[in-house]
Amino acid sequence: MKEHRLMDRIRLLAKNPNRRFSDDPREMIRSIQMHLQRILNTRRGSVPIAADYGVPDFTDYMSTYPESQRDIEKALKQTIQRFEPRLKSVRVTFLPQEENFLTLNFEIKAKLALGNGREPIIFESMIDSDGHIKIKT
């Protein structure tokens, strides 16, 4: 059941109290992907959970792009490390795209914290011209 976030576990148990949970890595990856999507599309300072929950508004960074790409990588990495404890050894790398100038693409490499071991995982993220982030595996 550790593959889900606490609120997801509570919601799932309320729907079906007799359900048995297993440590399914695919379910964990799906849950992490959804959580990353939620965190990285939340603007810092916009929710009462924590003042630093979410990411800065990346549209502000576009005026200094490409110099700001390292700042965006750093902001993504720090947010993931702080709010997604199921990922360890997080690295965020800019992926240049020649064909699409209106989006920024980043690769998120990390290790899944699974039981006794750590499995590598890669997520691809794309920031569109409106600052919306899409995450896929």
Image (cartoon, rainbow, N blue to C red):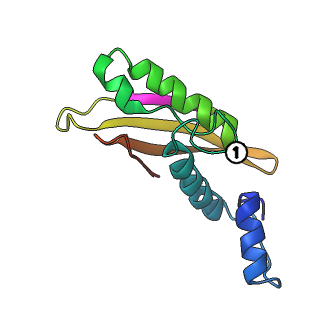
Given residues 10 and 84, the one toward you in this image is 10
Q: Residue at x 66, y 34 (%)?
A: 51
Residue 29 sits in which quadrant?
Answer: bottom right
Segment tinted magenta in the rendering: 90-94
Given residues 103 and 52, the one toward you in this image is 52
Q: Residue at x 53, y 35 (%)?
A: 55
Q: Is residue 7 magenta?
A: no
Q: Seen in the image, is 35 located left or right of residue 13?
A: left
Q: Is residue 95 above or below residue 65?
A: below
Q: Which residue is mark 1?
A: 49
Q: Seen in the image, is 2 located left or right of residue 106?
A: right
Residue 85 sits in which quadrant?
Answer: top right
Given residues 17 and 116, the one toward you in this image is 17
Visible residue check, residue 72? yes
- Give, as a three-letter code, the residue at label 1: Ile
- Residue furthest toward the top? 67
| Quadrant of the drawing holding the N terminus | bottom right
Q: Where does the image place residue 12, in percent across and percent down from the top left? A: 72, 74
Q: Where does the image place residue 91, in percent across and percent down from the top left? A: 55, 30
Q: Seen in the image, is 103 located left or right of residue 49?
A: left
Residue 110 sits in which quadrant?
Answer: top right
